[in-house]
Amino acid sequence: MAISSNARTALRERVEYLRRHGAGIVLDADTHITDPGTLPEAMARRIAESPDYFHGRPLSAEQLLQYLDHAGVDGALVWQNPACTEYTDSESTNYERLLAANRYIHEAAARYPTRLFPAGWTDPRALGISGACDLVDQLVEELGFPIVKMNPAQNRFPIDSDKVFTVLERIQARGAAVAFHFGADTEFTPAVGLERLALAFPDTIVIAVHMGGGGAAYLDAEDLYNESRALGLRAPNIHYIFSAKRDTHIESDLITYQLAGPEAARRLMCASDAPYGLPTWNFGGFRTLFASLQDGANHPDPRLQAQPDLFDETGIAGYLGGNLARVIVDAGDCVLEHE
């Protein structure tokens, strides 16, 4: 199968835009949007009854853009919100519902081509292995998505299970990058499992969202935080997204990877996990954190005191958007080359 003409054109335009402008823009690397007309009944009723936030309260594309504007963020990687996609006992029904959620991502990105950068989502448990692979084909070849995500935690399957290997083989065959929820909130995403995948697919970009965080309690996540930090230095195809992760560990990650050199540092990306986190809060915090890291001589970390000029504007611009832009460009180029 070959990527459709419309998908090829849209992907090429997106890649060329980021190739030209990506180094200088701020991008949120993890956001979830939802078509407000397709909300589960209980969720829609809860929204109608109260304006207060609840876990994962959905955002439309336009609502996300309002948050990005207030945060001074130019654009975002967008994928579906799993809390808003209700599954049934039917794999075929689940397929259609997840496809519809992915189509909303595609349509939103078409409306805002320089602001929303689409990524797909598949699920080998709810759709079955065959359905998950078929959806990969649609996501890449019909919709032109350069990244496809799976969520082993929410959908309850080991990250290095045989079904994941099968779906990842299909993603690799289409030239796309793969993303995973990777957190300490369940037993399904251990560091050893992520490493096994990365070693088995060394030429595939592997994006680990949350870098060991997710919904876990701080102390419970401590071991995976540390294991993730070390793993990323061993596996050069692993890219990490800072979202839903303790800020103190993010600081340690940044210093460690900056010291490791530009090839390591370019594989870290800032994000909010909207609607589970606020772009305003997170990017305000990221900017203040980077300002403190640039003031290395007065920073409490002895590694910065020894190298007070470790963080420069170019590197910081990478963390705030340039690194994600590069990932989308590299993955998009690979998809286009697989035509």
Image: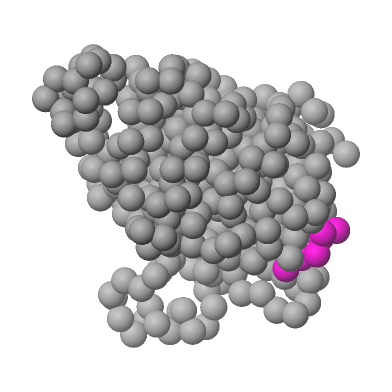
Count up the numbered dots. 0
Name the residue furthest left. 298
In this picture, is 321 found above or below 212?
above
Q: Nearer the viewer, residue 268 or 314?
A: 268
When asked about the image quadrant of residue 315, the answer is top left
Quarter of the picture containing the N terminus is top right
Q: Is residue 204 magenta?
A: no
Image coordinates for residue 146, horizontal then vertical, percent: 65, 37
Image coordinates for residue 316, horizontal then vertical, percent: 32, 25
Instruction: Name the chief secondary structure element in magenta.
Output: helix
**Which residue corresponds to the image point at 69% horizontal and 42% vertical from the top-left?**
196
In this picture, is 206 found above or below 281?
above
In the rendered structure, the answer to whether residue 8 lies left or right of residue 191 reads: right
In the rendered structure, the answer to whether residue 312 lies left or right of residue 9 reads: left
Give, as a single range, the part of the protein colored magenta: 126-131
**Which residue corresponds to the image point at 49% horizontal and 35% vertical from the top-left?**
230
**Which residue corresponds to the image point at 58% horizontal and 52% vertical from the top-left?**
190
Q: How is the image coloured?
A: one colour
